Amino acid sequence: MPMEETDEDIESGSLSNELERKRRDLEGIDESEGETDVAGEQRKRARRRRRCLHIHLKQYERGKTRRNEDGERETEYQANGGAEQAKEDYKYLRHRCRLGRRKLDLGSNILTITIRKRTYVINY
C-alpha cells in the first residue's frame, strides 16, 4: 500500500526525498514555460500582421516619408479607385491582416494606418 508523503517526510535527507523535491521544482518550471509560449505566440501574430500590411502596401506607389507634427514617421502612398477601394482595403486590413480599429482610420478618400511611431497614409 502506498503511503502518502507529507512535507516533513520530504524534508528529511533520504535520496528518494531529494528526487521528489527536484521533481516538484521542475513542475514549477514547466508552468513558467507556458507563459513564454504565450509571449512567443503573440510575437508570431504581430509578425504576421506586419508582414500582411507591408505586402499590401507594396501594391501602391510609395511617396515621401517625413516626420509629422508628433515626431512620428509618416509615409504617403498613392492609389486609384476612390472611396470604394478605400473601403475594400479597410475591410481587407481589418479582417485579413487583423489590424484593430484604433490602428485604422478611414476618411472619405484617405486610409490612415498608425502602428507605434509610424503612420502610413494611402490617398485614393
Image (tube, helix red, strand yellow):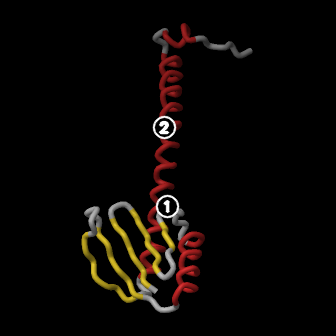
The 10 Å Cα crowd at callout 2, few under 14, some 14 to 19, many 20 or more, is few
Which is nearer the eye, 29 or 55? Answer: 55
Kindly report the distance in space between the C-alpha atoms of the residues bearing marks 1 and 2: 32 Å
Q: Earlier in the sequence, mark 1 or mark 2?
A: 2
Instruction: Give the residue at x 53% y 81%.
Output: 86
Q: Residue 83 in the image: x percent, y percent?
A: 54, 84
Local SS, label 2: helix
Disc 1: which residue: 102
Q: Quadrant of residue 96?
A: bottom right
Instruction: Give the residue at x 52% y 17%.
Output: 17
Instruction: Give the residue at x 33% y 62%.
Output: 117
Instruction: Give the residue at x 51% y 79%.
Output: 108
Q: Residue 72 in the image: x percent, y percent?
A: 29, 65
Res. 32 mark: 2
Q: Quadrant of residue 84?
A: bottom right
Task: Give the mark toward the camera: 1 or 2.
Answer: 1
Q: Residue 58 in the image: x percent, y percent?
A: 41, 84
